[in-house]
């Protein structure tokens, strides 16, 4: 005859063991779930997609991507622990880096993890045909007012018009820069980089003058023959925004507590190295050829294991 008391004890023991194993499995599963923002420019999105796919395929993570404006909102979310990591910060665009990063005198509530390999430059550009045919002496911001009538539109009210940094979240402060430098232009934010490129390409096709905010690395410089307009040198932000941008050594960054708990992700973010050419090639395939980002980045991963295998533990 089966001892009922023994059976109940055995059943309870098995249940507790299974429950414990289930809780351990769930805890382990949750420890492999991280949150990261989706960058609102294609280059940054490519960099973070590369991190995501390697983390998921090689390290067993599940990455939840959150769509939100870049810049200060991302920093605040990381500092608060609402997100785990982010990719490709351009430091000269970051007016509050001295609040969060010890590298710039901040409180360390965000960790600087390492350079991405992407070296960025930013500035204002006009089409070369305008310089060659109309404005041979146009080389810096100081000559822009001389030619502003070529850049006016019905909406600009007699001022020249800048196709500006697409979104306020990037904190380019184009209008403040123009005003501070005495340039009688109005900065127009079109909301997305896609809209800015489309307007510039349409004007270029019509052989019309335009002043455009742009950066490198980017395919727009292969598509259009542009001349950069000189701005005052960046001096550590002392004259910002009445200056140009610094050369940006971009970097990955994360929440310190999360990165201490996920050393393999911190290692990946700190040791990856994507070149300007590699990123630009992927961005062009996405923006110009209309290909799917996941597909393009996966192709790069499949073809370049000898490169990225050194990025992981």
Image (cartoon, rainbow, N blue to C red):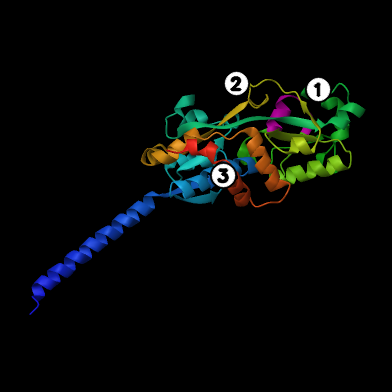
- Provide the secondary structure element on which disc 3 rests: helix
Is 100 on the left or on the right of 165, as rendered?
left
Say which label, 1 or 2, has the lower sequence index: 1
Is 310 on the left or on the right of 175, as rendered?
left
- Provide the secondary structure element on which disc 2 rests: loop
Of discs 3 and 1, which sits in the foreground?
3
- Is residue 254 visible to us here? no
Instruction: Compare residues 281 and 260 and report the one nearer the observer.
Output: 281
Instruction: Compare residues 310 and 162 and report the one nearer the observer.
Output: 310
Q: Residue at x 42, y 31 (%)?
A: 108
Say which label, 2 or 3, has the lower sequence index: 2
Say which label, 3 or 1, has the lower sequence index: 1
Of discs 2 and 3, which sits in the foreground?
3
- Provide the secondary structure element on which disc 1 rests: loop
Q: Is residue 21 above or below residue 141?
A: below
Is 83 on the left or on the right of 151, as rendered?
left
Residue linked to disc 2: 238
Q: Is residue 124 above or below residue 239?
A: below
Membership of 159 in magenta stretch: no
Image x and y of residue 27, in percent: 33, 53
Local crowd size for mark 2, using a 10 Å CA cut-off: few (<14), some (14–19), many (≥20): few
Q: Which residues are magenta?
A: 174-185
Image x and y of residue 162, in percent: 77, 36
Residue linked to disc 1: 139
Residue linked to disc 3: 301
Is 237 on the left or on the right of 222, as rendered?
left
């Amino acid at each position: 005859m089966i001892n009922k008391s023994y059976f109940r004890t055995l059943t309870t023991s098995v249940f507790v063991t299974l429950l414990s194993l289930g809780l351990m499995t769930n805890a382990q599963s949750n420890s492999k779930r991280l949150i990261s923002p989706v960058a609102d420019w294609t280059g940054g999105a490519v960099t973070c997609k590369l991190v995501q796919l390697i983390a998921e395929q090689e390290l067993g993570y599940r990455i939840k991507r959150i769509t939100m404006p870049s810049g200060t909102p991302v920093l605040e979310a990381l500092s608060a622990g609402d997100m785990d990591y982010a990719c490709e910060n351009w430091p000269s665009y970051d007016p509050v880096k001295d609040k969060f990063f010890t590298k710039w005198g901040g409180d360390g509530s965000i960790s600087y993890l390492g350079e991405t390999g992407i070296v960025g430059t930013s500035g204002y550009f006009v089409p070369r045909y305008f310089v060659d045919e109309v404005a041979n002496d146009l080389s810096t911001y100081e000559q822009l007012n001389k030619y502003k009538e070529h850049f006016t539109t019905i909406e600009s009210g007699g001022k020249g018009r800048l196709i500006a940094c697409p979104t306020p979240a990037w904190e380019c402060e184009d209008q403040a820069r123009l005003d501070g430098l005495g340039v009688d232009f109005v900065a127009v934010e079109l909301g997305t980089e896609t809209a800015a490129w489309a307007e510039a390409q349409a004007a270029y096709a019509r052989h019309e003058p335009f002043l455009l905010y742009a950066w490198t690395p980017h395919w727009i410089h292969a598509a259009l023959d542009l001349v950069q307009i000189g701005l005052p040198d960046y001096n550590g932000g002392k004259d910002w925004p009445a200056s140009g941008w610094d050369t940006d050594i971009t970097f990955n960054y994360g929440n310190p507590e999360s990165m201490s708990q996920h050393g393999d992700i911190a290692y990946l973010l700190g040791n990856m190295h994507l070149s300007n050419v590699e990123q630009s090639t992927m961005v062009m395939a996405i923006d110009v050829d209309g290909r799917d980002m996941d597909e393009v980045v996966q192709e790069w991963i499949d073809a370049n294991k000898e490169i990225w295998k050194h990025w992981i533990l």
